[in-house]
Image (cartoon, rainbow, N blue to C red):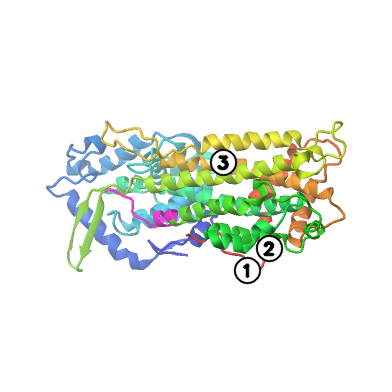
Amino acid sequence: MQLHPGALTLTDLRSLHRGELQLSLDPACLPAIQAGADLVRRAASGAQPVYGVNTGFGKLASQRIGEADLAALQRNLIRSHCVGVGVPLAPAVVRLILVLKAASLARGHSGVRQEVIQRLLDVYNAGLVPCIPSQGSVGASGDLAPLSHLTLALIGEGEFLVNGERQAAASVLRAHGIPMLELAPKEGLALINGTQVSTALALHALFTFEPVLESALVIGALTVDAARGSDGPFDPRIHALRGQPGQIDVAHIYRQLLAGSDIRRSHLEGDDRVQDPYCLRCQPQVVGACLDQLRHGALVLLREANAVTDNPLVFAHSDGSSVTGALVSGGNFHAEPVALVADAMANAIAEVGAIAERRIAMLIDASVSRLPPFLCAEPGLNSGFMIAHVTAAALASENKSLAHPASVDSLPTSANQEDHVSMATFAARRLQPMIDNVAHILAIEWLASAQALEFLRPLRSSASLEAAHALLRCHSPKLAHDRVLAPDIEAATALVMAGELSGIMHTLPDLPDLWAPA
């Protein structure tokens, strides 16, 4: 794939996230890259102070640096900023960071040489994973600490993760024939200034949550049928009157998933229940609203993936014989857009899990579901899904705490020079444990709804939902009597995370594009 700076799509990013593509740089961007680098080189030897080129950093910006020390200035910047802590970022996240940083620098507004961008692509194409600690960024002035660890690996002083083990960067680079990077003026600053880590973490969450949300739709529909709920609340006329696109799309999917169910037909007459509980009836309104938030998040993150978030920015013009322009200080490194979107994603993720937990509670409550208590044939002797629901409740509660907005917090840094920060990196990083929690909640609901379906035999659900039931039964038999359910939960969770239920949903006709940006 050829990297066209500023033109990455979500489809591109999904593939790059999975490491499926090799990247080369679009030759059309080379003149702008060269012009920017030439302008920085001229500024570095000029009489005027230029932040980060011939001055110190942050509160030390008033300190002028002599020309003989400019290379040392960049190396010292990287070394001093390598203060990250915590477990290393996942390989998929690091792959995105490499791509996003290369794409940003290739716009030509950071003043780096082509060699810097090519080195990022070389590392990506070789499948190498720089060791980047996950904690230590406040999401402003760029993701300084994590990007410094990335850069430290590029210059041969850091570490790479090889088969999960840390190895010295210099030896790994040599083994792959990749030259160690020598930093020219501004290049260290350009590599560590930017929102690529927080953006990559948020995109990673978006991509890993996609199959989980699709599983939630299939499992939610299975629960509707297992509880002998009505498909009336999914009538398109209801949702058209409100006009919310996510709600309309989710209702459409539920109608298709439930179409042809013998269970539904069996109780169209003579069912004295007037309305189903909210956890069944309001699924389009709740999950649809979550989908709208995620679609908006995808749009913002796609913009950010294509953005230039360096500082100062280089505006260069070349007429073929000379380069003119300016270096302008600004604040594109402030990751507030990512922070706010990550907080909205956290709320959406938590709500998908919260309504799923309520559906489990409904299924095990005989007074509401009209199924055997706790979904066991001999209640009392057996406890059935009693405590499996407790686990789901614990995870849903945990997500409520994790959903607390990170963006409303700010701690001044750099001796109050950087006095308002976004906390975007944590806002995005905390999404992954929330997704894991939701996947486990949905796994428990899937087990419960499949068990409930057993009590309705010989009636059959729709073809799609029977396929979901059969898929689970390949990994978990029905609960005839109490047994250890933890392995079943883990097996079902793995199926949810792997998108096995997405395959069932994608066989539906006229499936809307769930993940198109709003």
Asked whether the residues under the numbered discs 2 and 1 touch, taking CB atoms below 8 Å apart as contact, a structural biologist would say: yes
Q: Which mark is residue 434?
A: 3
- Camera-nearest label, 1 or 3: 1
| Residue with the mark numbered 1 | 510
Residue 237 lies, in percent from the top left, at: 60, 63
Question: Bounds of the magenta span?
Answer: 300-311
Cα gap from disc 1 to disc 3, whole angstroms:
31 Å
Mark 3, other Cα within 10 Å: few <14 / some 14–19 / many ≥20: many
| Residue type highlighted by circle 1 | Asp
| Between discs 2 and 3, the one toward the N terminus | 2
To which quarter of the image does residue 84 belong? top left
Q: Residue at x 86, y 38 (%)?
A: 481
Residue 350 in the figure: left or right of residue 277: left
Q: Is residue 32 visible?
A: yes
- Camera-nearest label, 2 or 3: 2
Q: Secondary structure at mark 3?
A: helix
Question: In the image, is residue 47 part of the stretch drawn in magenta?
Answer: no
To which quarter of the image does residue 368 belong? top right
| Residue with the mark numbered 2 | 256
Q: Residue at x 43, y 43 (%)?
A: 170
Mark 1, other Cα within 10 Å: few <14 / some 14–19 / many ≥20: few
Residue 402 lies, in percent from the top left, at: 52, 36
